[in-house]
Image (spheres, rainbow, N blue to C red):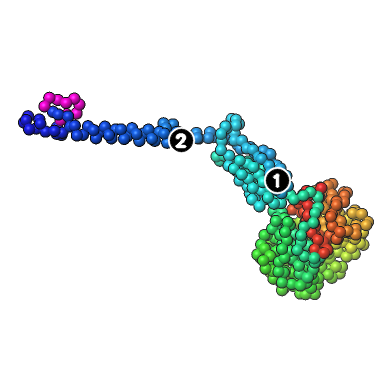
Amino acid sequence: MPADRLADNGRDDCPAGPVLPGCRAPTSRIPDMRRNRLALAAFLMATCAAMFTGCNCGTSTVAPPLPPLSAVHIAPPLDTLVVGTQRQFTAVALDTDSVAVSGAAIGWSTTDAGVATVSGTGLVTAVGEGVAQIIASASDKSDSATVAVFFQPGWYAQPSSTTNSLWGVFFLRNGREGWAVGDAGTIVHTTDAGASWATQVSSTSFSLRAVWFTSDRDGYAAGYAGTVMRTQNGGQSWSRITTLAASENFNDICFADSSRGWAVGANGVIARTGDGGATWTKSFPTANELQGVSFSDTANGWAVGQGGVIVGTRDGGRSWYVVQPSVTASALYTVWRRSDTEAWAGGAAGVNPVTVATPDSLQWTLGTFGALNTIHGIVIGTSLIGYAVGTNGPGLILKTVDGAVSWSPQISNSAQALNDVWFVDPLRGWAVGTGGRIVHTAKGGE
């Protein structure tokens, strides 16, 4: 090998490892390599130190995956809260052996934040009256609890925003949105279970006597001078149905579904629609003024009125028959048909006709609310629980828990007569009356 090559400092053909004879170590490169190794060591030490402050060095904090779950259980499954109070809920995830999984992350949510909110730890806060579901979930499993929120027990007055007498009330099933109607075309509306009511422009000055909604958008209000008002936007605007003549006063209205409805009133008129109010046909099964109408389905209905008259239909109102003999001569102001065989009516002098099913017919028999009581509104929500409102001087509220066999008075907190009542379930209801009175209970009046 040439001497000049052997003397070449840092040449590329020097093998790695110990320096061979005639081959000098590349002194200019060794310090660079050492510096690089020292820098790498310093980087690793700094990284490791950082890991101890916020990361791991050589280990992992990623939670182990959950085993397959069989269920999530929430507790308590049902609770009642007063607005503004809180309740801690708990939940546990169970594996396929029904053993609690330690450290399982539970997610919390609510179906209605306007009623109740829930924190990430299951702390529920009651916000506004109503019913909401609190949901606890882990992986693909979940469980829910029902929370009912109310302002106070018993019946109490709500600010109606009107002094005009109110004659009809209706609430959607959620128990938060409702309408009441009354004299001088009054329509008031609430979206918070009646905590506040606001006036809607009705586009009529005639007295409105009844209201009914078939959805959260579509509603009807019936009143004097043949007035039937309709809304298709939740009451933001109302327009009059012009296919009805202005000859009779309407006292009540109801619908069996989104298409089929009936309105009753003076001279025994019954107006029927099968197309959502676009067109109506009239019949006059009696000369007595009709005050109330109720259908249990699209075929079976009753209407009641002055002189104790009761008329019925089995074909959706295409034809009507008068119940004979009549069970009372006293005026009947309200009727509620819960099923094909169950119906209740009420009126002057506390008369309380009820239906009784026999093997081959359906008959009306006469009960009583008490001779000093006048009944203007009735609603029977279950086979046992129902409410009736009216007057015996001040506002009257009666409750039955035995299917109208007996009725017990409740404290109405209303000096004014009450004209109509609506319940969305056995506990939550509203009654409206003269002078713009609205009273409400979320505890079944207790």
Q: Is residue 188 visible?
A: yes
Question: The N terminus lies in which quarter of the figure?
Answer: top left
Measuring from the top left, give residue 147's x and y in whole percent.
69, 45
Identify the residue at horizontal 85%, vertical 68% (top origin). 289
| Up/down of 381 relative to 393, above or below | above
Quadrant in the picture for residue 72? top right
Magenta stretch prevailing secondary structure:
loop
Q: Can residue 261 be seen in this view?
A: no
Residue that numbered label 1 is attached to: 85
Circles 2 and 1: CB atoms closer than 8 Å: no
Identify the residue at horizontal 78%, vertical 67% (top origin). 208
Measuring from the top left, give residue 121's x and y in whole percent.
61, 40
Measuring from the top left, give residue 207's x and y in whole percent.
79, 69
Quadrant in the picture for residue 440? bottom right
Q: Which of marks 2 and 1 is nearer the N terminus?
A: 2
Mark 2 vs mark 1, CA separation in Å: 40 Å
Residue that numbered label 2 is attached to: 53
Residue pushed farthest left? 2
What secondary structure is marked by label 2? helix
Identify the residue at horizontal 79%, vertical 56% (top origin). 157
Label 1 CA crowd tier, 10 Å (few <14, some 14–19, many 20+) = few
What secondary structure is marked by label 1? loop
Kind of residue indicated by mark 1:
Thr
Q: Which is more toward the observer, 139 or 262?
A: 139
Residue pushed farthest right? 371
Label 2 CA crowd tier, 10 Å (few <14, some 14–19, many 20+) = few
**Which residues make up the magenta segment?**
14-22
Kind of residue indicated by mark 2:
Thr
